[in-house]
Amino acid sequence: MSAETPPTSQPLVSVDGLEKYFWENDSVLDRLFGDEPVAVRAVDGLTFDIHEGETLGLVGESGCGKSTAGETLLRLQEPTDGRVEFDGDNVYDLEGSDLTEFRRDAQVVFQDPFSSLDPRMTIGDIVQQPLDIHDVGPTDERRQRVRDLFERVGLSVDQLDRYPHEFSGGQRQRIGIARALALEPEFLVLDEPTSALDVSVQAQVLNLLADLQDEFDLTYLLISHNLSVIRHICDRVAVMYLGEIVEIGPVEDIFEAPKHPYTEALLASVPRASTDERERDRQTLAGDVPSPRNPPSGCRFRTRCPMVIPPDDLEIDQEDYRAIMNLRERIERRDISLETVGGDEEFEFTDGSIPPADVDAFVDALRERVLDRELPARHAELVDGALAELASTDWDAAGTQLREVYASVCERDRPDLGEDGHPVACHLYADNECETLENVR
Ligand code: SF4
């Protein structure tokens, strides 16, 4: 956690190509009916190291695969593919006493301190439970260890015989932390450890985690959607989008000079702290996160990326290009209600088409509905040509017309995450000539 953590120290955790897919339509019944299994790619090829004494943050919107990555890394879920080395051993090969030792050395603190504590057990028994399961020392030593841990995390030993419901959220998270530390682990996965807490308590818990890291030489993987939490406690940050890491680097680099357009968008959506900053608009990321069942081709962020790259030979304003790409995606998803175009004066489709005399009016009404900006004449003409295909509900022809002119390298090629000190998976940086997004623009 300290800023001085040497980045060249030996990795304690080394993740290589980690994949975790869940399968849908995979039952015997589905196979009988001939349904193909569908992969939900929750974690799709993560590679990163965590060095001894370091805190690596894993950040991204909810549903991007962060928690699944943490659970798979701890072998609470079996991976689909990939390798995780802990202290040099592949954790997925461990068996017997080696696996037991890994389970002691690598612990987790969960987001919801209430549901992760058994309401029928006293908090003393909850914290002692890992020591009982692993049969660590005689009973009086276990009780003493629990008392020491209580004091260390800021709880009173007088409370040992109370039950979880008698405590506040912050106190319950301290109980969860004490339990995670009972077996003297080397590594903790902190899965949204403060997101269920009041803002006033969050900083206390983060400071406690920082102190405990120094005192017990702990290594952390901190999973959070909250960039303020990440900045408060992490040495390095890995930014995840739809199961992949899109950027990883030292915390100051990520916050001061983000490279990936997704990282920049995440930072732009954080509420401003200072008065100066509040004068800037708080931006939110446009569009929905695509489904991990059917992630976009090429760069997975391309359906929302404000910087999506136009073809080399196309002269077009970036915002116009984004608007046309949004329209194209809606057409390809058939996500426009053609029957209601025109409002009260709807157009009448007969056998899937409207009368030729109405096509121009239909295109005008449809354009008004699906585009919120006026395009330069050349692009307006191309877009109108595609919209005219929808007058005869020919979605494929409309999509093809737009694809032939506007297809982006971002949808054809999947950008690789590089290997330097601050790698980024984005075609804008393919030749590594650009230092930050400012330079790209
Ligand atoms: S590869 Fe293209 S779509 Fe993806 S982040 Fe970079 S510019 Fe945006």
Image (cartoon, rainbow, N blue to C red):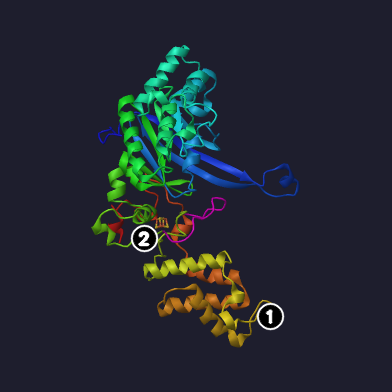
Q: Report the image quarter containing ligand 1.
A: bottom left
The amino acid type of the residue labelled 1 equals Thr
Judging by the rendered image, the residue that carries numbered circle 1 is: 350
Pinpoint residue 169: horizontal percent, then vertical percent.
43, 38
> Residue 305, position in %: x, y?
42, 59
Mark 1 packing: few (<14 Cα in 10 Å), some, or many (20+)?
few
User: Which secondary structure dominates the residues rendered in magenta?
Assistant: loop
Note whether ligand 1 is within 8 Å of mark 1. no
Task: Tell me the distance, in whole angstroms, between the alpha carbons under discs 1 and 2.
Answer: 43 Å
Q: Tell me where residue 291 appears, x and y as whole percent.
A: 54, 53
Res. 410 in view: yes
Q: Horizontal placement of 41 versus 212: left or right?
A: right
Dot 2 falls on a residue whose secondary structure is loop
Magenta-drawn stretch contains 289: yes
Amino acid under disc 2 = Gln
Does the rendering let one see residue 86? no
Q: In this view, does 283 lie above or below 171?
A: below
Tell which residue pokes out farthest to the right in this image.
32
Quarter of the image that includes the N terminus: top left
First to last magenta residue range: 285-298
Q: Is residue 381 left or right of residue 281?
A: right
Q: Residues within 10 Å of mark 2 (few under 14, many from 20)?
A: few
